[in-house]
Image (cartoon, helix red, strand yellow):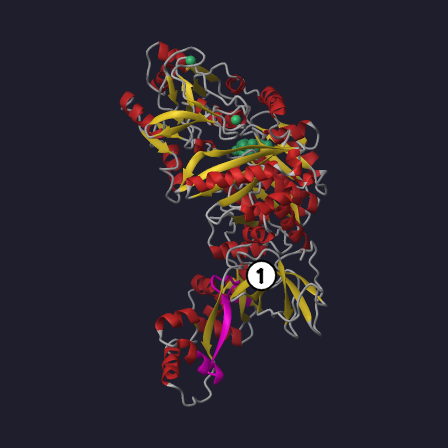
Amino acid sequence: PCLKAEVSSAEYDEGPAFASVLVDCPGATAAYTYQIPRGWRVQGGDVVEVPFGSQVVRGIVLEVLAVLPPSVDPQGLRSLLEVVDQQLFPKDYWALLEQIATYYCTPLIQVVRTALPPGVLGRSQRRVRLRPPQGIPPLSEQGQHLLRFLQTKGSGDYSVRYLQQQLPKVQRALKELERLGLVETYLAAAASQQPKRQQAVVLLNSEGKTLTQRQRQILRYLQQQGRDCWLQEVLKATGTTPQTLHRLAAKGYIAIVQQQHCRTEQGIAVTPDRPKTLTPAQATALHVISKHLDCAQTFLLHGVTGSGKTEVYLQVIAQCLGRGRSALLLVPEIGLTPQLTDRVRARFGERLLVYHSGLSEGERYDTWRLTLMPEPRVIIGTRSAVLLPLVGLGLIILDEEHDSGYKQDQPQPCYHARTVAQWRSRQQQCPLILGTATPALSTWQAAQEGQIHLLSLPQRIHAAPLPPITIVDMRQELHRGNRSMLSRPLQEALENLQGQQAILFVPRRGHSTFVSCRSCGTVIYCPHCSVSLTGHLFGEEMEVLRCHYCNYTQRVPQRCPSCGSPYLKPFGGGTQRVVRELNRLFPQLRVLRFDSDTTQRKGAHRQLLTQFAAGEADVMVGTQMLTKGIDLPQVALVGILAADSLLHLPDYQAAERTFQILTQVAGRSGRGAHPGQVILQTYVPDHPVITAVKAYDWDSFATRELSSRAPLGYPPYAQLVLLRLSSPDPEDVAATAQAIAQHLQRLDAVSQGDWEVLGPAPAAIAKIAGRYRWQILLKGQSLQTCGLSQALIHLKAECPRSTRLSIDVDPLNF
Ligand code: ADP
Ligand code: ZN
Ligand code: ZN
């Protein structure tokens, strides 16, 4: 059966009708047809419970049919069991989810599972509850036993499974009680979320002459609030009892009603904030965008940190709300950008909704449902917020659009929030703003070609200069006998801090290791793919170097192929080693460590940053995390210890990432009144990326990098698809990878030369959590047009059970 893009909303009160249901169950691949019980109103987009094999599962009604499709056998037809939730899927939302499923080669139900809040889909369970007793007829011993058990709890509401664990022979006793009408059984979702309701007080009449002091006080309170108030809130604020409220209700002054209580993280403005008078550059940007509020136009708002991008976002959002539409503001990681959230809250207060995976299930469910309402709101969230229903959407903004946090690596769908945002902008005819100091190369290229409208904010607001960057050649340090990981210029700068603060940046390397020559800086690259070769360990020794794109393999040379020196070594050095070295050289400096180890605890980010901002430490040593949304005016020195470990990542985007990260880190220096400085250590001081970073020269870097990607056929000049395979058995996964690669080689798109198959090869991180990992990289022109998507979706069937296969379209992490 095929899935229809449009969900029909026809209702059928009479006669037999059928529902085509997308069933949420592993193994269910298509839509299944069910009978709708007589008299039920079912519509496309409803969440229902259905029998599936021997289980009861949930599913979504795709469409309602008046007649049974000829392909369905009326004999085996089963009925819907329950409607759990209604109309969760507006029509264009369906279309979006289907587009994601098609583009990312993922079954639709898996996309739906990702998009829905927790507790809507998922297993159901059968429960038992007591019915009002009408005299108890004679019962068997087990029947009496079960009844007594149920009566110990008021409603007698238990799951059948629980009863089975507690009592013997429950099934038979249950049937007996059910037959006699003493209990009823029903289905419920195991982890069901329902809108939460609670008592609220509504003011009906505030004029009351014959009332007591206390009663008048309550009416005054309600009048001051100017809205319905929660009963609990009124009791607390006025210090009264529920009886007083009920007496007021009996006299008709107030009403006590059940209202839906939203468990959302809503904004309450602490200190309201007003729009700023824009600089000329900001005003131009705002003017251009506001002329396109009804167009599916994408803008790149290009400006260094502190150039006033956020202020532009806020003023565009205000215009969008003014037109009665909602705005979605996406950020890479919400925990790391509390300052941005605070600013949006200060400007828009109660209209703000926050959505991210750190919320409780109830909060996520309620926030999700709120975005089904057309009321204009500002939704700020991480990547998954782009999958909210967002009825009445009028604007999308991606802050730090280059950030790889917008890409989901696993599980499928491996979507990119920017790509989905582009589709939504087209669907809703609304603008999309991409804001950043360091655009993704693909964004930059689209801007150069005119598909994206480029808007620049060339200066920091208070015209503060960017800090000068000094490059230190680490080969010279070695030749002059300094074997410390801190170069002499950096040591001198640390000695001269004079009460100011410093940040030392040590890039995280993942697990992969490249080999470099300490004497001349040479790094060994794959001759075919232009990515660094990864060292593979055999015991303690690193013997083999391998390309994890194409599987090119060579032995580790004894001597450097360029200069013949024997100092060819794996590159390394983590934050802990740097802290030790600092303690040894500068015992007087107080040091904080900021990396994934020290920030694991909830709230640890903020705490460490607050400590540092309060001057409780002189130096902060940290990883990439330091690049995100930190504004610390006291920082006068930024040291970049190992620029090379970014530059030589085994990844075709290594240069792009390096430029982005180094520019962001450098920007941490000199934000306050004092001019800052940056010291960048490297073994390849003449590398074009390093010289471009030093000059803050994005334009020429981008031009050079784009022209080097074109001949290699890397994005944006071609599309990549990464197949990731893993298995607990190293031989199985290698064999499966080989078989799949051979199968792919025979496909038309590949044999005719439109697509190229690289590998299979072991992944850069060859083993994670006991599973061996291999990968196959596909390179070619537009997946959609060559029929390859369908072939990829069917590959799963070719894999043995123990092997997991995931398809990553437009992969960012290798
Ligand atoms: P970005 O988002 O590019 O980092 P922001 O919008 O955060 O830049 O602006 C940097 C700082 O300058 C903020 O403190 C902001 O309040 C302030 N600012 C922004 N625009 C203006 C303006 N037009 N006039 C005065 N201050 C401004
Ligand atoms: Zn060398
Ligand atoms: Zn290669």
Residue wearing tag 1: 59
- Picture quadrant of ligand 1: top right
Displayed quadrant of residue 299: top right
- Residue 525 location, x and y as percent? 49, 21
In the image, 621: left or right of 309?
A: left
In the image shown, does 710 or 451 lie closer to the viewer? 710
Residue 510 sits above or below residue 588 on the image = below
Give the secondary structure at mark 1. strand
**10 Å neighbourhood of mark 1: few (<14), some, or many (≥20)?**
many
- Residue 252 location, x and y as percent? 56, 74
- Residue 646 location, x and y as percent? 46, 26
Q: Tell me how many marks there are.
A: 1
Q: Quadrant of the N terminus?
A: bottom right
Residue drawn at (58%, 31%), measured in percent from left and top? 440
**Is residue 367 part of the magenta span, yes or no?**
no
In the image shown, does 183 or 678 lie closer to the viewer? 183
Displayed quadrant of residue 504: top left
- Can you see residue 414? yes
**Is residue 180 part of the magenta span, yes or no?**
yes
Residue type (three-letter) at the residue carrying disc 1: Gly
- Residue 232 location, x and y as percent? 45, 64
Q: Is mark 1 within 8 Å of ligand 1?
A: no
In the image shown, does 118 or 517 lie closer to the viewer? 517
In the image shown, does 369 or 668 lie closer to the viewer? 369
In the image, 26: left or right of 238?
A: right
In the image, 319: left or right of 157?
A: right
Residue 365 sits above or below residue 602 on the image = below
- Can you see residue 211? no
- Residue segment shown in magenta: 174-202
